[in-house]
Image (spheres, rainbow, N blue to C red):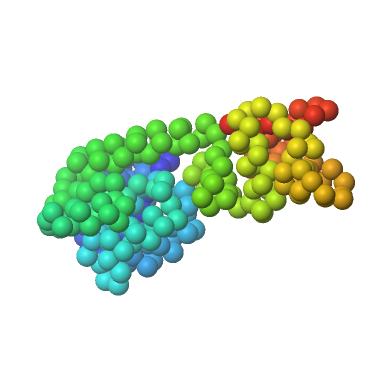
Amino acid sequence: MEKILIIEDEESIRGFITINLKRYGFTVMEVETGEEGLQLLEKNPDTSIILLDIMLPGIDGFEVAKRIRETNQQMGIIMLTAKTTESDKILGLVTGADDYIPKPFSPNELIARINSLLRRINLNKTNVVSGVKLDREQRCIQKDGIKIELSPTEYGILSILDLAKGKAVSRNDILDEVWGLDFPGDPKIVDVNIRRIRQKIEDTPSDPKYVQTVWGYGYKWEK
Ligand code: CA
């Protein structure tokens, strides 16, 4: 079931939200401060939505949203706003919130907003799942919204395969491009690195979907 985190310092509001979300079958976690919320999220990366109060003891809701977005674009953030001033809305958007609910709100309104955001999140997930992506800016792989680190050599190989746009690249061409024309070692070094890449990015490394072997020739990148 979808996991929802409530970050709200007012106990009565927290209790009210928790009861209603549980009634709809959501898994609910609740904390009083932004600091506790961020800690809990580290242990629960599968959280779908965060209901985030703005005025909190310690760091405020805007800061919490900003810090979540530094490492995670996938989680949904709904701000619980006591007052819906324009500046709150703008600051919320800048810091990465997806939606707002002005207090007080009814259980129906809350559930409707959550369901609407869940639909958008899950739509996004299916788009992302269709393939892994080589992130040229950060020189890594993005898979299902998760960053997979690559060594410079691994990045070099994937970069060449990616540029070939699905066409096979020979083992020798990979060797020349990544290790240089004067590389004195064994060309099998390419295969060793391919194996390591598969361990990192494939669902089943023994039956690779993304980095495919072209027998007697080399490799190709299927996205
Ligand atoms: Ca508050």
Whether residue 76 can be seen here: yes
Q: Position of residue 47 (x, y in %)?
A: 42, 49
Residue 71 lies in quadrant:
bottom left
Whether residue 46 is situated above or below residue 132 in the rendered picture: below
Whether residue 195 can be seen here: no
Task: Give the residue displayed 16% in from the left and 48% down from the top.
Answer: 105
In the image, 119: left or right of 110? right
Q: Position of residue 114 (x, y in %)?
A: 29, 42
Q: Position of residue 121 (x, y in %)?
A: 38, 39
Task: Give the residue displayed 51% in from the left and 35% down from the top.
Answer: 129
Q: Camera-side residue: 215 or 86?
A: 215
In the image, 87: left or right of 155? left
Point out the image quarter for the N terminus.
top left
Task: Give the residue displayed 60% in from the left and 53% down from the top.
Answer: 149
In the image, 16: left or right of 159? left
Whether residue 108 is situated above or below residue 45 in the rendered picture: above
Whether residue 18 is situated above or below residue 8 in the rendered picture: above
Q: Camera-side residue: 45 or 134?
A: 134
In the image, 146: left or right of 190? left
The tally of labels here is 0
Q: Position of residue 36 (x, y in %)?
A: 38, 66
Residue 29 lies in quadrant:
bottom left
Task: Give the residue displayed 54% in from the left and 46% down from the top.
Answer: 136
